[in-house]
Image (cartoon, helix red, strand yellow):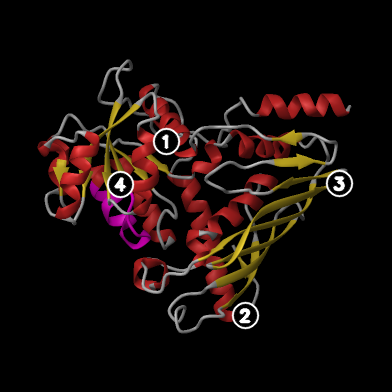
């Protein structure tokens, strides 16, 4: 039995996770299938500069072709490093004219969360496919508007949940699907780090700051993907140890989720505590992941002795190639807009619970 379980986990690493639904409409890309899709990055902050742009150099099906920035001083640096042509450089005023540029197939929105809805909707209206970083948006209403805009303009909308493209995460998702150890009884999930910055968008409410949307979605996903259920209620408590910095948004959030099957989850997220783990207790065993949402590789173990430790060069490269293949092959996206919306429903309920100090039904 143990050997069968070990074989089961090893196979899980090469099987792509799938969602429980198909997109309402499937669309073909603007390029032939044997060519790479042209990607334009909107926003040239840390994530684009240090992670996405380098990852694009590792992809098989994507090519960095354009940039959108409000910082003119960054343009020559990016053009020299990545060979971006003048005609593929945009600012936030002429952004919509990207509709007329055949070099660009996908617009990747990498801005503070408060700007995700506006630029994702504008991107959809250009007729280009849209990738948006997580968290999808600060509110459910904005997420729903983003999904509607993509559908209305016959383009796809993917959310940048890199972890769901990681074979280590896919392995524990498959355990949750096939339940070889019985039903999930309890999940403990945490995601956070100590942020030393004092004047960043993550500390600003009007920019979509706060740890719950930014890091908390990893803790939420840990519980959702492990149980393969949507929570039905939440109880939450917010706190801060640095009120001089975190006076607009929470520094730390603890929340407890209840699922339809009766499974429970105790989750934490923070900008003041380093934590990155997942533990799932089943009827007849357990699964542990630590780290669970790291850039540099996630790994874990199971009570039968199985080790989950698949190596990939770049989660971001895997994510973008997976999403590009879905576009090129008219296949379902692994993480469509509807998945981002599910998390933001929980985030909204967490904030409501913390504010009212009571259980909130979702």
The mark closer to the camera, 4 or 2, is: 2
Instruction: Identify the mark at residue 149; answer none if there is no mark.
Output: 4
Residue 126 visible to an observer of this rendering: no
Q: Is residue 17 left or right of residue 189?
A: left
Q: Which of marks 1 and 3 is nearer the N terminus?
A: 1
Question: Label 1, label 4: how many angstroms apart (C-alpha)?
Answer: 13 Å
Residue most toward the top? Answer: 34
Question: Label 3, label 2: how many angstroms apart (C-alpha)?
Answer: 31 Å
Q: Earlier in the sequence, mark 3 or mark 4?
A: 4
Asked if disc 3 and disc 4 are in contact, CB closer than 8 Å, the reply is: no
Q: Earlier in the sequence, mark 4 or mark 2?
A: 4
Give percent across and percent down for residue 198.
40, 74
Crowding at dot 2, Cα within 10 Å, few <14 / some 14-19 / many 20+, comes out as: few
| Residue shown at 62% from the left, 80% from the top | 357
* Secondary structure, magenta segment, majority class: helix
Question: Label 4, label 2: how many angstroms apart (C-alpha)?
Answer: 35 Å
Report the front residue among 48 and 206. 48
Q: Would you place residue 272 above or below residue 281 in this image?
A: below
Give percent across and percent down for residue 125.
22, 44
Range shown magenta = 109-122
Instruction: Identify the mark at residue 247; answer none if there is no mark.
Output: none
Find disc 1 in the rendering and name its residue. Answer: 24
């Amino acid at each position: 039995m143990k050997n069968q379980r070990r074989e089961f986990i090893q196979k899980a690493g090469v099987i792509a996770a799938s969602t429980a639904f198909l997109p309402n409409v499937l669309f073909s890309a603007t390029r032939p299938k044997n060519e790479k899709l042209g990607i334009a990055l909107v926003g040239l902050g840390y994530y684009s500069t240090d992670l996405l742009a380098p990852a694009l150099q590792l992809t098989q099906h994507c090519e960095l072709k354009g940039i959108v920035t409000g910082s003119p001083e960054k343009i020559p640096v990016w053009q020299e490093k990545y060979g971006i042509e003048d005609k593929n450089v945009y600012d936030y005023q002429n952004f919509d004219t990207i509709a007329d540029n055949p070099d660009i197939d996908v617009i990747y929105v990498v801005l503070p969360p408060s700007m995700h809805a506006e630029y994702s909707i504008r991107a959809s209206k250009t007729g280009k496919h849209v990738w948006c970083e997580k968290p999808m948006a600060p509110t459910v209403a904005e997420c729903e508007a983003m999904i509607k805009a993509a559908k209305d303009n016959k383009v796809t909308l993917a959310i940048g949940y890199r972890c769901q493209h990681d074979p280590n995460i896919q392995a524990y998702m498959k355990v949750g699907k096939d339940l070889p150890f019985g039903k999930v009884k309890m999940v403990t999930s945490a995601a956070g780090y100590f942020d030393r910055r004092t004047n960043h968008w993550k500390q600003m409410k009007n920019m979509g700051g706060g740890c719950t949307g930014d890091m908390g979605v990893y803790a939420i996903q840990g519980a959702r993907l492990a149980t393969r259920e949507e929570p039905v209620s939440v109880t939450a408590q917010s706190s801060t140890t640095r009120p001089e910095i975190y006076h607009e948004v929470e520094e730390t959030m603890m929340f407890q989720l209840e699922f339809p099957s009766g499974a429970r989850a105790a989750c934490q997220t923070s900008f003041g505590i380093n934590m990155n783990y997942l533990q799932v207790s089943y009827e007849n065993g357990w699964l542990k992941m630590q780290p669970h949402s790291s850039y540099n590789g996630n790994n874990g173990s199971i009570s039968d002795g199985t080790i989950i430790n698949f190596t990939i060069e770049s989660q971001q490269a895997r994510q973008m190639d997976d999403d590009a293949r879905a576009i090129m092959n008219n296949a379902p996206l692994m993480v469509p807009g509807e998945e981002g919306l599910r998390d933001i429903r929980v985030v909204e309920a967490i904030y409501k619970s913390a504010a009212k100090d009571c259980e909130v039904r979702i």
